[in-house]
Image (spheres, rainbow, N blue to C red):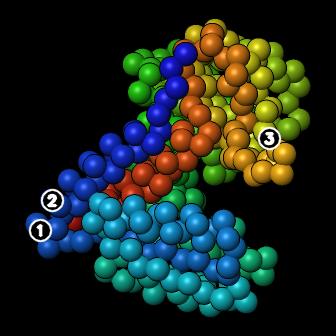
Amino acid sequence: MKIIDGTAMAEGILGKCAEAVAGLKSTGVIPGLAVVLVGHDPASDIYVRRKIAKCRQVGVRALEHRLPAATTTAELLKLIASLNKNGEVDGILVQLPLPRQIDEQAVLDAIIPSKDVDGFHPVNVGRLSTGGKALVPCTPLGCMHLLSSVIDDFRGLKAVVIGKSNIVGKPVAMLLLDRECTVTVTHVHTRNLPEIARTADILVSAAGSPGLVRPDWVKPGAVLIDVGVNEIFENGRRRIVGDAELDGLTHAKAATPVPGGVGPMTIACLIENTVRAAAIRVRT
């Protein structure tokens, strides 16, 4: 079985982004990403710092906005409105989750589609679902890059997606449909999940359940993309694991590890979307 190295692939994407940024800079354009963090969640703070570091690595200008935990929806919407109008900002990322008092959907809807580098705005979701040109959610886009590294022709393949979230499950299903796969999306009420999983040529697990996918759930020759990021404690030590158990999975064609699989690709695709948004701004 091949272990797909998401870290190496992400660096390849970032290298291409750096080349594109250099080309844009030669025309006087510096791509800009505004990163908004509300509150002091330690995990969110780590994610934001990683994203800003990758921006700087490729030459994207990172504009960081840190707001207090007591920020209101109205206050955050005011910031979003100003970033929408800012000509130096090509992408707007609001780090999730937001504090409970903030209307998350109202905030995401307020980001104009052309700067929605997370791909969450209803306009981009609609374009994706109808096969139009859209900024695609970063994690599903990363999944497709990973799959394309080991699959040449998607047409007619059976894909099973475990999890129906708006962030991963639904958009990755639409991307697989666009590649002419036959797609089944499962969820917590799905019956006979192991049997359904065993039919898949492509199995994408985004359930957030450690150890859910056992080796005998995976069809011989299938490709497994593990999107799960789960924190567990063993012998007093913290460990990050995926949804799948890779031990004993020698019969699969390929699989992604956790960590080092989908995670690095998500950040790389965020940068890729930002550079793409800047290139579109130049053309228009």
Q: Name the residue that disc number 1 marks.
A: 27
Q: List x then y, in percent, for residue 258.
A: 62, 39
Q: Mark 1 near mark 2, Cβ–Cβ under 8 Å?
A: yes
Q: Mark 3 near mark 2, Cβ–Cβ under 8 Å?
A: no
Residue sitting at x 81%, y 20%: 194
Q: Name the residue that disc number 2 marks.
A: 23
Q: List x then y, in percent, for residue 189.
A: 88, 35
Q: How far separated are the C-alphas under marks 1 and 3? A: 47 Å
Which residue is outermost to the left?
Answer: 26
Q: Quadrant of residue 100?
A: bottom right
Q: List x then y, in percent, for residue 23.
A: 15, 59
Q: Amino acid at mark 2?
A: Gly
Q: Name the residue that disc number 3 marks.
A: 209
Q: Secondary structure at mark 2?
A: helix
Q: Is residue 87 above or below residue 179?
A: below
Q: Which mark is residue 247?
A: none
Q: Secondary structure at mark 1?
A: loop
Closest to the observer, 273 or 108: 273
Q: Name the side, left or right, on which 266 lies relative to 185.
A: left
Can residue 206 be seen in this snapshot?
A: no
Quadrant containing the N terminus is top right
Q: Secondary structure at mark 3?
A: loop
Q: Mark 1 near mark 3, Cβ–Cβ under 8 Å?
A: no
Can residue 119 be seen in this snapshot?
A: yes
Q: How far separated are the C-alphas under marks 3 and 2? A: 43 Å
Task: Classify mark 3: residues with Cα within 10 Å, few (<14), some (14-19) or many (20+).
Answer: some
Whichever of labels 3 and 2 marks the residue nearer the N terminus, that label is 2
Q: Is residue 63 above or below residue 280?
A: below
Closest to the observer, 136 or 6: 6
- Tag count in the figure? 3
Residue sitting at x 65%, y 74%: 106
Task: Classify mark 2: residues with Cα within 10 Å, few (<14), some (14-19) or many (20+).
Answer: some
